[in-house]
Image (cartoon, helix red, strand yellow):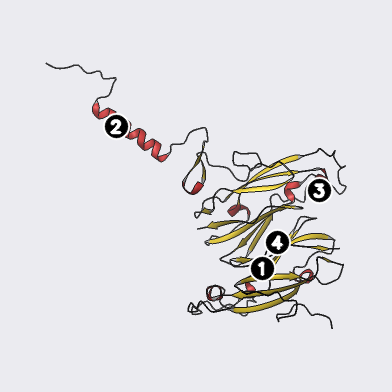
């Protein structure tokens, strides 16, 4: 059965995270034309970040692709909160609890999500979430 | 008996006033025409002549590069409100990159600032090529293997990337084709 993107559930390819942060895994190092550029991600937030993002971690997880063979940067949050459902401005702060952890998962086709151009190019990829960020990864679109 | 005093030389009170004026002038840092560099608090680079941004010439703060690549230096690690967020950059490229960017390296240098305390990414090339002067469709011939070309840029990131006025910490990465800087960090107060 073919994988559907985007999705927000845990998968066998979802990275393991044992502390607050964001971690991603690319489905491959290079992708053929029209093949989904699969990115599997996991986030863990603590009490302070959960409060900072008002429980909307995915609107703070930003995927950034920097082209190496052409000038261009493509970036987009994992989820863009529509204006019809704004984040509550007066949400009461979450009491600080050092043991609090909130997990989430995301699975994206970067080609579709970032609207990457069809021409072949290599890219750098970085994913950030507030104070957390991934290492700089690399992938190629053939 | 009345003593004659030399009117051209100040008395004791005058000497004290001169010393006080000199100390005050040194304290407030009266500008000089030399634009001398000095390290202030927190290692901040201060120039007595305000730097103009953007500019594309080598300045004393320009990073040194001895092989093809790109290198940048932030003027400080944190910046007060309305203070220019100074970024000094140097790049060096070889023949293959010259052909790849068609001699327009500045349009390939991309600044990406990722906010840590607010949501957002701000990105822009050092130079945007206007439509009136399009890049030539045919690439230039490959220069000889020893070909090297230097360039410099000095930007106020706040102005260049149109960073918002809210305080936030940012990550910064600068790329140029296959070359990139480390991920740097700065704060807007």
- Name the residue beneath numbered marker 2: B17
Q: Residue at x 51, y 76 (%)?
A: A98
Whole-number angstrom distance, CA of label 3 to CA of label 4: 30 Å
Please rate how many residues cluster around mark 2, counting C-alpha atoms within 10 Å: few if below 14, some from 14 to 19, many from 20. Answer: few
> In this rendering, do the residues under marks 2 and 1 share a single chain?
no
- Tell me the subunit letter for badge 1: A
Tell me the mark number nearer the camera, choosing from 1 and 3: 1
Placement of A49 over or under B48, stated as above or below? below
Task: From the top left corner, tell me how far across and down residue B121 is, in percent.
Answer: 64, 63
- Name the residue beneath numbered marker 4: A136
The answer to whether the residue labelled 1 contacts the one labelled 4, judged by CB atoms less than 8 Å apart, is: no
Whole-number angstrom distance, CA of label 4 to CA of label 2: 61 Å
Depth check, front residue: B132 or B36: B36
- Name the residue beneath numbered marker 3: B135
Depth check, front residue: B58 or A29: A29
The picture quadrant where one finds residue A123 is bottom right
Comes first in the chain, label 3 or label 2: 2
Task: From the top left corner, tell me how far across and down residue A24 is, in percent.
Answer: 70, 70
Q: Secondary structure at mark 2?
A: helix
- Tell me the subunit letter for badge 4: A
Q: Residue at x 35, y 35 (%)?
A: B23
Whole-number angstrom distance, CA of label 2 to CA of label 1: 61 Å
Whole-number angstrom distance, CA of label 1 to CA of label 3: 31 Å
Tell me the mark number nearer the camera, choosing from 3 and 4: 4
- Name the residue beneath numbered marker 1: A62
> In this rendering, do the residues under marks 1 and 3 share a single chain?
no
Q: Residue at x 60, y 63 (%)?
A: B115
């Amino acid at each position: 059965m073919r994988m559907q993107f985007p999705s927000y559930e845990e998968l066998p390819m979802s990275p393991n995270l044992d502390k607050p942060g964001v971690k991603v895994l690319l489905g491959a190092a290079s992708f053929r034309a029209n093949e989904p550029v699969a990115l599997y991600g996991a986030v863990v937030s603590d009490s302070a970040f959960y409060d900072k993002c008002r429980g909307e971690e995915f609107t703070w997880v930003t995927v950034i692709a920097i082209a190496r063979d052409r000038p261009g940067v493509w970036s987009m949050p994992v989820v863009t909160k529509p204006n019809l459902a704004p984040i509550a401005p007066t949400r009461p702060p979450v009491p600080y609890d050092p043991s609090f952890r909130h997990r989430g998962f995301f699975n994206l086709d970067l080609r579709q999500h970032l609207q990457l151009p069809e021409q072949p190019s290599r890219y750098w990829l970085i994913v950030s979430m507030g104070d957390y960020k991934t290492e700089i990864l690399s992938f190629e679109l053939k | 008996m009345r003593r004659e005093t030399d009117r051209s030389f100040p008395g004791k009170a005058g000497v004290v006033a001169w010393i006080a004026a000199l100390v005050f002038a040194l304290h407030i840092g009266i500008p000089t025409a030399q634009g001398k560099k000095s390290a202030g608090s927190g290692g901040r680079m201060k120039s007595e002549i305000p730097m103009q941004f953007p500019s594309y010439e080598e300045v004393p703060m320009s990073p040194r590069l001895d092989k093809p690549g790109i290198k940048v230096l932030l003027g400080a690690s944190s910046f007060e409100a309305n203070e220019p967020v100074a970024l000094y950059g140097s790049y060096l490229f070889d023949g293959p990159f010259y052909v790849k960017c068609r001699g327009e390296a500045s349009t390939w240098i991309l600044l990406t600032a990722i906010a840590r305390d607010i949501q957002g990414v701000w990105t822009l090339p050092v130079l945007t090529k206007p439509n009136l002067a399009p890049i030539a469709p045919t690439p230039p011939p490959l220069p000889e293997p020893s070909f090297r070309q230097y360039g410099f840029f000095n930007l106020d990131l706040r102005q260049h990337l149109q960073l918002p006025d809210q305080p936030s910490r940012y990550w910064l990465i600068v790329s140029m084709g296959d070359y990139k800087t480390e991920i740097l960090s700065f704060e807007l107060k």
